Amino acid sequence: MKKLIALTTSVLLAACGGGSSPDSPSASLTERAAATDPAASAPAWLDPLTLVNPYIGTGIGFPNPQDRPSGSLSGSTYPGAALPFGMVQFSPDTGYGEPNANGGFNYAKNVIQGFSLTHASGTGCPVHQDVSILPYPGTITTSPATDITRYQSTFSHGAEQTSPGFYRVTTTSQVSSELTVARRGGIGRFTFPAGANPNLIFNVGRNAVPGSNAQLQLVGSDGVEGVVENTGVCGRGHYAIYFHGRFNRPYTSFGTYRGATVSAGSRSTARVPQTGGWVSFAPGAPVELRIAVSYVSIANARLNLQAELLTDFDSMRGKAGANWAEMLGRVRIVSNGKRDDEVKFTTALYHSLLHPTLFSDVNNEYIGFDNAVHTTDGWDKYATFSGWDTSRAQMQLVAWLAPKQGSDMAQSLVADAQASNAGFPRWPTANADTCMMYGDPGAVIVANMHAFGATAFDTAAALAVMERGANTVNLRSRDCETRPSLSQYLDQGYISSGPLGAVGNTLEYALADAAIGQFAGALGDLAKRDLYLTRAQAWKAMLSSSGYTQQRSANGTFVMPFNPGAGNGAFGNYTSAMYTFMVPQNLRGLIDRLGGNAAAIARLDTHFQQLNSGNGLQATLSEAIEQGTPWAYAFAGAPAKSQAVVRRILNEQYANRPEGLMGTDDLGSLSAWYVWGALGLYPEIPGVGGFVVGSPLFPHAEVRMGNGRTLTINAENAGAAGTYIGTMAIDSLPSTRTWLPLERLAGDTVFDVVLGAVPPTPAWGSAPEDAPPSFDVPRASTPSTSFSTSFDDLLQQPDWIDAPQAQAGTGRMETSTRRIGALHSGAAALRYAGSATDATLAYAYNRVFDVNIPVTASTTLSYWIFPDSSQPNSRFVAIDLLFDDGSSLRESAVVDQNGVPLHPQQQGLGGFLQNDVWNNVQAQLGALAGKTVVRITVGYEQAGATGGFSGTIDDLSITP
């Protein structure tokens, strides 16, 4: 147990070993139900494949037109076949580049102009729709490039069938088109009516962006290949995608076209716009097309086809369904009696797992940001990150459920930054940045994914990229500046003017700096952690006496006139009312500056009078910057109000119909928010693994986490009447905490809540110590000669709650403030509790405070400890100090006032600590002069015993 400070948060606590009687008040809901009804031990889990409705988000309009006018926006999703994070999305197109149907499919239209191989789910601008393929039962006489309406098919939604990984439609011309996919390609099976002339049109010059170059080559008697050029989202950037396809039988005739010119018998086209070709087949059996893509070359597309598509259609469809069943099955639910809720949840989970998309080929090659071909050493390269949106909640969900893919996604962003020698890209499409949106979201994504379990990537390189982007002025990723106006942010501490919103970018950079700080801390670099967490307070410079964030000039004055509900350039496309609460790293600090809990709650109440107002003083929850605001109530001591607002959002802003999303889904951003809200958990704080606790929507849910453990969520009275948490327990231990650290889920965990129709009195989770953590200017960033806390003052609350530094042979240890039980002074103390399970050696050390205290010849440590007699090992606990050289107090020769070493085991054996009374421990630290205390921990350690330990620590001080 040497140099504990070098250990990282990857050393996690294991699950508690104890249980409880089914008759005990602390017994879990599952235990009590199973005791009275054996069938209750086997919940009726729903089949996720039957609950996905891919049409949600394909309609133009809003779930609640009372908030915003109908007909002005859609979720821009697509209904076709895809795999989780797959390279190919084989889906029907009702148009190309159609406004408000950026997924290629407008539910209100009854025509299909093609089935293309690439789509994005929920972008705000047209993108992709590459390699359009259209079956046609007639004769090609005019150019589909200029006369597409002649060849498009009409259909009705009653003739469609869709499920994860599969799509089928029969058009009014009686052509049946069936689509399914592998990771890098798909199979189309096209059945033509008897007597028809089967044709497949490759309208490769038609995609989401008019005027794109393309090239087609017909190979032999059964092959097709080529390349399509396109831009990234919103017409920014540029990429090329290559394809290679094979038919199940030879074509009998063919031709190509360019513009309005048709060339029957031609096999190839130049690389130009408005081009394509067709192949014709003899009537008879269905035509099957196996087609793969690559962003590197046609040769790689051939390799992808050979590796993944040499199977029959039905087998591939079955594999695609099984793939989705396994992925969606990582979060299982039991019915709450509302079918629409079940469909909304499962579809939201489905939409959350479509992006980012695979970008490397079966030979591990991919095209980099430097336009050179790179080869991974076995990890998968991913692309297309809607960074500003998905950094809030979606990427955390991916990392939590699928850490292998999440780690590869983080490594992909690192590779992009390294190839361009810049910071992280903001909104990369394929191998280009599009410069879209604000902030430095790539840094936030990588920190969040690491915090939620996706840790298998080059973390040192990632931190280097983060720092380069955060400190280098005019740094560019391809054609996009990593942090515009960075010089102002570094010199002034805020941005006074700039091209992308002075206030908005100040808050975004502060959020990114918070994520960088947490990431650095997780890697063990406390100095960088403190540096960036200090920079993360830049939002304070923008908060005016109005109580809103406001543009500030270079001379420090706030710009007038000012209307917090009106959009202006300082906030990008948004308003101060929307941005002010976007301080998830330090909501406690914001609340204090707004005048305290009551003032902040009143502001939030006004804000949520409308949920999706479309800018103004009320909320616009379809925008990413507002996604964390409903959870801010918990930081102000009013978690019941968060529970009420979140339930309103789930009920009113999502629907089981095509107009079912309150805005563009932004590659799963809005969908992931629904998943979190329905589970009653939300990843609020950037770079920190943990959740604000809310009220679950379903009576039972089971999450198979990426660490291989299971989180079971039981919510008594879930459903229409169950909105407010009355009581909560974690592994049968009652809790009023509104923050659930991810470390608490290191083992199989049972999370029980009892819900009610009205908030309880007193309100659950409303005490100051129940609030989630906030990160202000770190205490450790400034050297201090002393430290003291009675755990009453909010400014002296622990930096870490129940946070393991290291453990072995024990269950998880609690170290958190409590206002109940034994108190030495004041109204709160630090509670410790845990259980030793290994008689050979058991230890648990939890982080509590980060500090910066140089030790002098006269420095003294003092604390009071109250071991409980109810547990056999309660005396084997001590305060431990970690020093800047990696050593610890317990390893030193320092003894207390009774001559007992300060190691927890020696304290327990020393004979001076008594159970059920307050014991004072004092020690002179002068022998350690020259060292600096960097962390205060609470430690249990004992060899040769098992059993529980619990007690209370109060009035801790380090004085000169």
Image: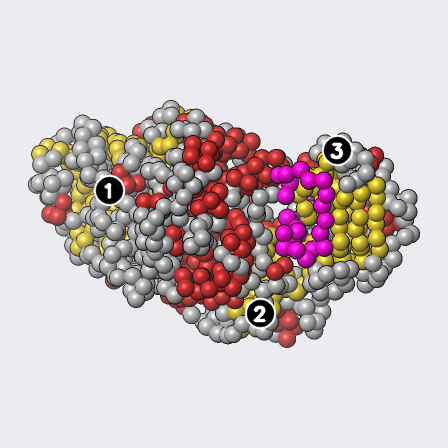
Q: Residue 474 lies in what quarter of the image? A: top left
Secondary element type, mark 3: loop
Residue 791 vertical placement versus 491 (above, below): below
Q: Which residue is mark 2?
A: 763
645 in magenta: no
Q: CA distance from mark 3 to mark 2?
A: 45 Å
Badge 2: residue crowd in 10 Å (few <14, some 14–19, many ≥20) = some
Q: Are marks 1 and 3 in contact (CB under 8 Å)?
A: no
Q: Which mark is residue 931?
A: 3
Quadrant of the drawing holding the N terminus: top right
Q: Earlier in the sequence, mark 1 or mark 3?
A: 1
Residue range in magenta is 779-807
Residue at 76 percent of width and 44 percent of height: 959
Which residue, as the protein is rendered here, is positioned at the far top? 372
793 in magenta: yes
How many numbered callouts?
Answer: 3
- What type is the residue that disc 2 sits on? Ala
